[in-house]
Amino acid sequence: MADKARPVVRLRVLRTERLTPHMIRIVAGGDGIADFRPNEFTDAYVKVLFPQPGVRYPEPLDMGVIRAELPRDQWPAMRSYTVRCFDAQAGELTLDFVHHGDAGLAGPWAARAEPGDELLLTGPGGAYAPGTEADWHLLVGDESALPAIAASLEVMPTGVPVHAFVEVADPTEEQPLVTKADARVRWLHRSAGHDVVAAVRDLEFPPGTVQAFVHGEAGFVRQLRTHLLQERGVRRDMLSISGYWRRGRTDEQWRAEKAAERAAEQAAR
C-alpha cells in the first residue's frame, strides 16, 4: 500500500515504563489517535518516523510528497514496531522498544522519551492472527517478536494447545504473559547458550494441524523456515515467518538486502 494511502499519524507520548532492563514501553495518544486505524492482526506493525535534524518537511506530513520532493538523505528514518496494544476507548497506543544503550536510533529515543514528546508513525500493516483451523499453535521469536507473541497469546481460544519459544538475553528479560490457552512457554536465555533452533527441533510436535508464527533475527528464522517446511511438513499457508532484523546489519542495510533477495528470487522464476 502506498504511503499516500497511509497518512502520518501524529501522537504524543503519554507515559513510559521500563518493563525489563532492555525493554521500554511507550504509551502514546492525544488528538491524533483518531487518525489511527487498527487492523485485525496480532502482528500489526507501524513504521515509526524519525525526522532528520534541520530538515523542514511539508505540511501536512506526507511520505509520498517527501519522497517525491526531497533527496533521499533528508527522508525521515523509519523503524518498524509491533503494536503491543491499542485501546480505542482510552485513546492509547502501546509500543515496546528494545534498548541496548546508545546504539541504534529507536531504542535511545525511547530511553529519552518523556510525556508530551511527539511520536510520528504510519500504518498499521500486518499479516498474522491465530486462526481457528489449527489444532495447535507454535510461536517462536526473540525480543523483537515478543510484543506480537504476547498479543497473540492474549487472543488464543481457551484451552487451545500452544508451544511458545522466546529467546531473550537472560532471566531478567522475561515478562509475564497472559493467555487462556493451554500454553507452554519456554524462555531461552542467550547468556546460558540456549539455542532457539535446537529447542524447536527437539519439540515433539502434537498431532494435528499447526499454525506457526516465527519472527525475529534473520539467521535463526532462515534455519527454522527450512526445518518447518521441509522436515516438519508445515503448510505454507499456516506459516507466518519473517526476519525482522539481521545481526551485524543496520535496519537500512537489512531492508536493502531483503529487497535485493526478493528481486533475485523474482528474476529466477
Image (cartoon, rainbow, N blue to C red):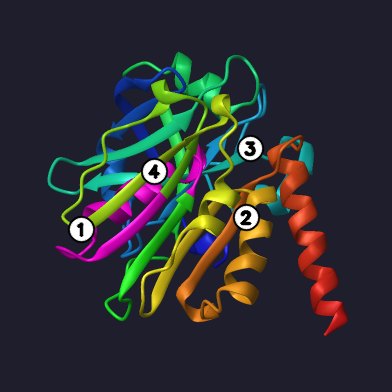
What residue is shown at x 20% (from left), y 41% (from top)? 91
Query: In terms of sequence position, does the residue under pointer 1 or pointer 4 come before the other?
Result: 1
Q: Mark 4 points at which residue?
A: 186
> What span is colored magenta in the figure?
141-164
Whether 219 is drawn above or below 213: the answer is above
* Residue nearer the viewer, 38 or 100: 100
Real-space Cα distance between discs 4 and 2? Answer: 17 Å
Q: Which one is closest to the eye, mark 4 or mark 3?
A: 4
Whether 236 is drawn above or below 172: the answer is below
Q: Name the residue under label 2.
A: 221
Horizontal and vertical percent position of residue 109: 51, 21
Real-space Cα distance between discs 1 and 4? Answer: 15 Å
Whether 199 is drawn above or below 54: the answer is below
Q: Which residue type carries mark 2?
A: Val
| Residue 76, label in figure | 3
Q: Mark 1 points at which residue?
A: 181
Relative to 22, 181 lies left or right: left
Query: In terms of sequence position, does the residue under pointer 4 or pointer 2 come before the other?
Result: 4
Instruction: Provide the secondary structure element on which disc 4 rests.
Output: strand
